[in-house]
Amino acid sequence: MSIRKVVAGLLITAGIAIMAVPFFWRATGEKQTEQLISEFEQTLEDDYDEETDVEEEQTSISEEDEAILKEGGVIGIIEIPGLDIRYPVMEGTTSKVLNAGIGHIEETAGIGESGNCVLCGHNGSRYGTFFTPLSQISIGDEVMITDKKGQEHIYEVTETEVVNPYDNSIKTQGEEKELTLFTCSQKGTMRFVVRCRYKEAGVDE
């Protein structure tokens, strides 16, 4: 076999390997996201069973679930049906959090609480879709968040805007129940912001 053929074969192999890298990272991210959601839903199921059957002995969640639900763990699940978005919500905005789901700005109101609950997510991450399609949202669309008690909180989109990355008004707190979502825009030089008002709450079946 000639050296030219060997070199050509190596170049083809390297090219295939390079093309496969993005698919690997996306599959890894999606697998982690699905696992977090599954564990969160299982925890809700376990809590529901314990509350509705008082005669059964109380069962403790696994050490793994307990670790996930501690500080930095999953605090809810956000769904935007119109955009096919469904991700776990976690405390904080570290890279670890944002590579697995949607981050909750810790100094803002909690899910379903009075005040402004602020959530952020990646736009164009190799680990998943996250808030990439957020700019396609429409006024009147619904955003649903299920909290750790299994209660579903529904918000309605009232406004969208693009602001500079240093605009802290998106975290402004008030007395009304509000939700603000944001992600990077214009190659990271700006932020795309979605403002929502609280609509209703119900129990997640």
Image: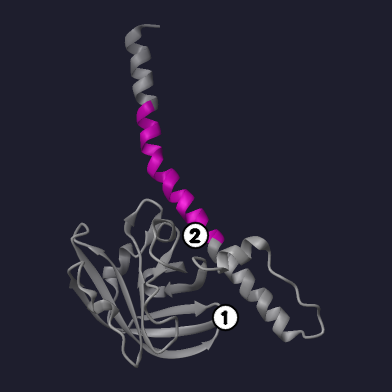
- Residue 30: x and y in percent read 47, 55
Quadrant for the N terminus, please.
top left
Taking the magenta stretch, the answer to whether it contains residue 97 is no
Residue at horizontal 78 percent and vertical 86 percent from the top: 54
Q: Is residue 185 above or below residue 126?
A: below
Q: Is residue 122 above or below residue 49?
A: above
Label at residue 150: 1
Magenta residues span 14-35
On the image, numbered disc 2 is attached to which residue? 33
Label at residue 181: none
- Residue 202: x and y in percent read 52, 89
Q: Nearer the viewer, residue 21 or 100?
A: 100
Extreme residue in the bottom direction: 175
How is this picture coloured?
one colour
Alpha-carbon distance for marks 2 and 1?
19 Å
Q: Amino acid at mark 2?
A: Thr
Q: Amino acid at mark 1?
A: Gly
Q: What secondary structure do most residues of the magenta stretch adopt?
A: helix
